[in-house]
Amino acid sequence: DDEDNFRSVVETADSGFVAIGYHSPVANAQRTMIAVRFDKTGAVVWSRLYPTIETTVCKAIVPGNGGGYVIAGSILNSINGPEGLLFKIDDQGDVLWSNAYAPDMLFNDAVRVNENVLAFVLGLRIGLGL
């Protein structure tokens, strides 16, 4: 059975919302980023998967400047170690841009400080060498 796990939600201008997280076609399989747009009654408007060759998880979403949404997440099993991932989608869920960041630079949350500034909360995974 499919598994969808949502990590963050943001209200849309028309009182609907966009939820983001990950999708897995079966339990414990590779995870793919997912975003689902709901209207104000809770009906699904669109659902998008953002597949990559690695396991990826969306962790936070905030309204983007000029519309759309900025999503923060992680590429979990990159060859170089876990990496942070930011991407922007438009109001229909289509990707406008995306960037991966240095290994072990993981985004755990995002906050809109004001209309011009987004702040991202980083989490660092450190190996203990055990």
Image: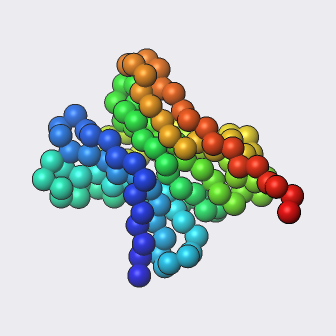
Residue 24 falls left or right of residue 8:
right
Please tell me which residue is depicted at 40% across the width and 48% down the height of the picture.
Answer: 8
Please tell me which residue is depicted at 18% across the width and 58% down the height of the picture.
Answer: 43
Looking at the picture, how far across and down is residue 63, in whole percent?
A: 37, 33
Residue 106 falls left or right of residue 127:
left
Color style of the picture? rainbow
Residue 44 quadrant: bottom left
Q: Is residue 27 above or below residue 16?
A: below
Q: Is residue 80 above or below residue 90?
A: below
Residue 92 quadrant: top left
Looking at the picture, how far across and down is residue 30, in whole percent?
A: 58, 70
Looking at the picture, how far across and down is residue 96, in whole percent?
A: 47, 39
Q: Is residue 49 visible?
A: no
Q: Is residue 72 above or below residue 27?
A: above
Q: Is residue 27 visible?
A: yes
Q: Quadrant of the N terminus?
A: bottom left
Instruction: Identify which residue, 40 or 122, lies in the foreground.
Output: 122
Looking at the picture, how far across and down is residue 113, in whole percent?
A: 43, 22
Q: Quadrant of the C terminus?
A: bottom right
Q: Residue furthest bottom?
A: 1
Please tell me which residue is depicted at 74% across the width and 45% down the height of the picture.
Answer: 103
Q: Residue furthest right?
A: 129
Instruction: Identify which residue, 58 or 53, lies in the foreground.
Output: 58
